[in-house]
Amino acid sequence: MDFFDVVSTQRAIRRFLPDPVPDALVARVLDAATRAPSARGAEPWAFVVVRDAGLRAEIGRLYLTAWETAGQFTEATDADRDVKAAPHYGRMMRGADALARGLGTVPVHVVCGLDHARLGPIADGAGGLRSPGAAYSSILPAVQNLLLAARAVGLGTTLTTLHRAFEPALRELLGLPDTIEPVVLVPLGFPRDRFGATRRRPLSDVVHLDRWGTRYARLDAPEGDS
């Protein structure tokens, strides 16, 4: 696929077919993940590919419990009051609920970890981070590469972090060393939902020229116009 077609149609996929994902495709998207930049060139990423049905089912059970707890909090505090009237909100929440209830059956889970042992002075040696920005900018580009590569080969993904609510249990399930921080959980499989062009705020809303509030008028020019 053309790169810009990949970018403009890569979206959160939350419903998956049960079809198995070939190891060759998993390897391809993970190889793409490792092509990302990282602070100090240290490549402080580590991935656990979860295929075992029992492990996936248990992760799914824990995830659903965390999802339901989060939903109770959101409802009780009206936490989404700033976005719940948006056109996308209802569809997004239905998809997120479907993911929570079906995560255990998604063919592949990829746990994307940050290896503190490779962070050098960015980590404090006691499980903390001296520079969180530098640390997470060394794993999140790899995750984005993974998401884009998956789209390019026809696989669906979404970036999830709800597993942080049950991180100790996840660590025990997967036997993670103390130095590995599971930053993102990515379900990976063939999509039941369709890919399609994403809708985003216009550039005029988010891009400023030289100083905040100065419109970058040239971005509104027709493509190729100079």
Image (tube, helix red, strand yellow):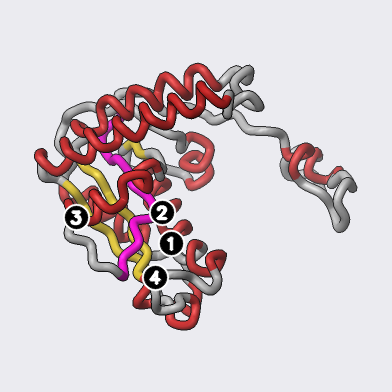
Q: Amino acid at mark 2?
A: Val
Whether residue 51 sits left or right of residue 123 in the image: it is: left
Q: Which residue is mark 3?
A: 172
User: Disc 2 on helix, strand or loop?
Assistant: helix
Mark 4 Cα shell of 10 Å, populated few (<14), some (14-19), many (≥20): few
Q: Is residue 131 above or below residue 23?
A: below
For the residues labelled 2 and 1, the Cα–Cα distance comes to 6 Å
Question: What span is colored magenta in the figure?
Answer: 179-191
**Mark 4 or mark 3, which is nearer the start of the sequence?**
4
Residue under numbered circle 2: 143
* Residue under numbered circle 4: 127
Secondary structure found at label 1 = loop
4 or 1: mark nearer the eye: 4
**Which residue position holds label 1?**
139
x 24%, y 50%: residue: 170
Give the residue type at disc 1.
Ile
